[in-house]
Image (cartoon, coloured by chain):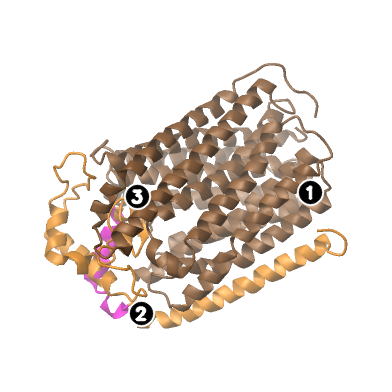
Chain colours: A orange, B brown
Amino acid sequence: MSGAFTKSMARNIFYGGTVFFFLLFLALSFDTHSQLPKRDMRADITPQVAEGKKLWEVNNCIGCHTLMGEGAYFAPELGNVYKRRGPDFIKAWIAAQPTKEPGRRKMPDFNFSDEQLDAIVAFLKYVDSINDANWPPNDEG
Amino acid sequence: MQYKSQAVAKLYFIAAIGLFAGQILFGLTLGLQYVMGDFLFPEIPFNVARMVHTNLLIVWLLFGFMGGAYYMIPEEAETELASPKLALAMFWIFLVAGAATVLGYLLVPYATLAEMTGNGLLETMGREFLEQPLPTKLGIVVVALAFLFNITLTVLKGKKTAISIVLLIGLWGLAVFFLFSFYNPTNIVIDKFFWWWTVHLWVEGVWELILGSFLAFVLIKTTGVDREVIEKWLYVIVTLTLITGIIGTGHHYYWIGTPEYWQWWGSIFSALEPIPFFAMTVFAFTMVNRRRREHPNKAAVLWALGTGVMAFLGAGVWGFLHTLAPVNYYTHGTQITAAHGHMAFYGAYVMVVLMMISYAMPIMRGRAANSNKSQVLEMWSFWLMTVAIVFITLFLTAAGILQVWLQRASDTPLSFMDAQDKIAIFYWMREWTGVVFLIGLLAYIISFFIGGKEEQTA
């Protein structure tokens, strides 16, 4: 780190390298967005799915669960719960919370209407249909 | 203290330590809820406690970054802060906004909070780490801009050192990438894609510039090594950070609906992400070995060396552990991620802020270093917290490996909750180790109140 290699050379490499790799990242991001329509099933995003996503957010579901592996690790993965449990089970399960079992991790009662439960199921069904490179490894999530 | 206006940093540091204590108390609550599921339910459900835990972490680190910048920039620029009054006003705005947000989380259901704060106008809430209500997010932008205005102006009217420039790039990057937190499209794939532009480009990008800049500053001050040498190292480290870390974002694009080529880009570039952290370790040790003076603040030097080592272990090694796509296929979203998150945040960002506080606080209190007695206790707190985080990480890693095995790799996979029950012992050990961490933190706080003969040699 001495001799011929000077501070101003290091600085120039820093600026040049950063700009180059940021532009490369932008190019990859641009390409990704041109490919997404084939993968994200955007045609299936109905107003009901959008409503489900909103409910997912304003009740902070991500604070306990993961969705496509992202979120908290306290409660099960829900990106594939539609396939794992099916719509009726999901609705019944949410409506039955919190469980009475002492010591078991608890999910709050969110007082959802039937219409809201349907929207949440529609959202989870949509997420399950996204092409996410075959993740998770099995149905247990 | 060379410049009077540096003193505004003191308030920022005090707030940072207070919020740090809050973060740890909520962390212990969460750890207990992992094994006693109905603890504090329904008063404080897990998701609420977790929001408080992670948001307090972010806010106190930001307090630490701002305090560090307010302390460092006048000394680097060799001029008073452009506006100490603005810095003071922003402190109170940020503190009140932060406290109100946490109270909001704790006192009303999140959905009600969203309704009360106008989430309908622009839906930004309910995404991990970016849970803040819209007014808080806007407040963060205002505070960040006022802060950046203040320190940028200071640098512009004074000397422009490499350390200042790297810090400014880091802080401006922090503000710019935060703007993506306002973008929340209905399409969840695009939502997640840009969510990482805030989250990843913060912690594996621009925050590392702030880390490197602080570390370089304290190393110059405590070792007396030539600035030319230290700043050259700094440029090399931040170059390595950004050329690996920017494309390294790809390691979050494996399984969220983005094209498969990210598995290659993400694996290759993020496998290189440990290199800048390793360089940081070598940097810290080399500079301390080549020191031209014995600085009386031994605790600050210990934090500087500590952050070098622990950032490499937590961010570098534990990140590498699960960053290759074929491995991540199994470990994604398990306790392995939690293990990495804990040691990386502690090693890289908690320790560097504590290093800054350790170096600057005695000077702001009118001495070069604290008394020997106070420093000994501070070093005890260093070891207690650091050893505790290492064991927390090891226990979570063990839990994560078993979780992957039971739930994903096995021929007869268990359900999530059944697997969790089987690994509960590791959660208990994590919780007890968390208590050790809290004891370390208490020792740290007490060390500020220990007097004794002051070290006067500068």
> Which residue corresponds to the image point at 69% horizontal and 22% vertical from the top-left?
B372
**Residue B189, numbered circle:** none
Tag 2, which secondary structure? loop
Circle 3 Cα neighbour tier, 10 Å, few/some/many (<14 / 14–19 / ≥20): some
Tag 3, which secondary structure? loop
At label 3, the amino acid type is Thr
Which residue is labeled 1 in the image? Answer: B158
Q: Are marks 1 and 3 in contact (CB under 8 Å)?
A: no
> Which residue corresponds to the image point at 67% horizontal and 52% vertical from the top-left?
B280
Task: Tell which subunit mark 3 falls on.
Answer: B
Task: Tell which subunit mark 1 falls on.
Answer: B
Closest to the observer, B6 or A86: A86
Which residue is labeled 3 in the image? Answer: B117
Classify residue A3 as left or right of residue B450: right
Which residue is labeled 2 in the image? Answer: A39
The reply to whether label 3 and label 2 mark residues of one chain is no
Tag 1, which secondary structure? loop
For residue B136, above or below residue A14: above
Give the residue furthest to the right: A3
Question: Which quadrant is the C terminus of chain B positioned in?
Answer: top right
- Using the numbered discs, state the Cα–Cα distance from disc 2 to disc 1 in whole angstroms: 52 Å
